[in-house]
Each structure stands twice: as structure tokens, then as C-alpha cells.
Image (spheres, rainbow, N blue to C red):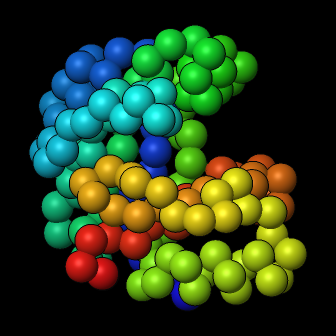
Amino acid sequence: MLKRIDHIGIACRDLDAAIGLYESTFGLTVVSRETNEEQGVREAMLMVADAPAGMSYVQLLEPLGPDTPVGRFIERRGEGVHHVGYGVADIEAALATLGAAGLRLIDARPRHGSMGASIAFLHPGDLGGVLTELVESPGR
């Protein structure tokens, strides 16, 4: 079902400073910047070059305010790893299979994600405390 690690989502207070850190430290390249009002974040996707099994990214997430999911995360835990995103070939089939297996779905249906992807989150309480995102890239 899971095809690859699509991205690691990292919560940060200052998106521009975090981008500078990841560019200068690791040589990563920003391939997308977006504001996602629905999720309450400004975000940047930085490509990890030569990743095995296709593209993988570091996703930097700056909250639009303290009352957003990422804003509350930073308030409780500080900056750092927020979630892990896994690539899937068919997100609706993956949700059906995981829901039938008893996992709690934060998103019962896919929604719009970064770079035109369809995404859905799974409850961290069922996955060892890890907020997990399923990602179906456009064009699969």
C-alpha cells in the first residue's frame, strides 16, 4: 500500500529562516511555496535530490496563527517533526482499507494538498503517536 516516504513535515516559526537553513545546510531546493488557508499554514516543499524510489521532500510548515493546528503544535511541543507523509497509488483505496482495519481517519475523504496532491491524515493515537499523511501525487 505505501509506496515511498513522500515527505517529512516540519513545523517552524519562521518559514524563510527555515528555508535558508535547509538550503545552506543540506543543499535542498525549494520546488513549491504555497499558503494553505484551509490548513492554516504557509509551506515550502524542498526536494531531496537523488532520493531512491522517486521524489521525496522536506515540507516546512509555518502557522498562519496560534489557533491553527501547526500553531498549537508549536505551542505544545516547539518546532520540529510534525508528520510523516507516505506516497500511495490510490488514496481512496488506502483509506478504505485502513478504515476497515480499524484505524481512525482524520480525513474520511481526500482533500487538496501541496503541489496538487490528494491527501488524508490518519490519527496519531493509532500509529504510535505519529501523525501520518497519505499522499497521492497528481497523475499518480
Q: Quadrant of the C terminus?
A: bottom left
Q: Position of residue 50 (x, y in %)?
A: 17, 69
Against 27, residue 2 (above or below) is below
Query: Which residue is rendered at x = 46% and y = 84% of the image?
Result: 90
- Residue 4: quadrant of the picture: bottom left
Query: Which residue is rendered at x = 76% and y = 76% of the image?
Result: 99
Q: Position of residue 133 (x, y in %)?
A: 55, 59
Q: Quadrant of the N terminus?
A: bottom right
- Residue 22: quadrant of the picture: top left
Q: Nearer the viewer, residue 7 or 110?
A: 110
Q: Position of residue 82 (x, y in %)?
A: 56, 40
- Left or right for 23, reference 11: left
- Left or right for 37, reference 129: left
Query: Which residue is rendered at x = 40% and y = 72% of the image?
Result: 136
Against 135, residue 106 (above or below) is above
- Left or right for 116, reference 6: left
Against 35, residue 49 (above or below) is below
Query: Which residue is rendered at x = 32% and y = 70% of the image?
Result: 137
Can residue 28 be seen here? The reply is no
Can residue 20 be seen here? The reply is yes
Q: Position of residue 130 (x, y in %)?
A: 69, 52
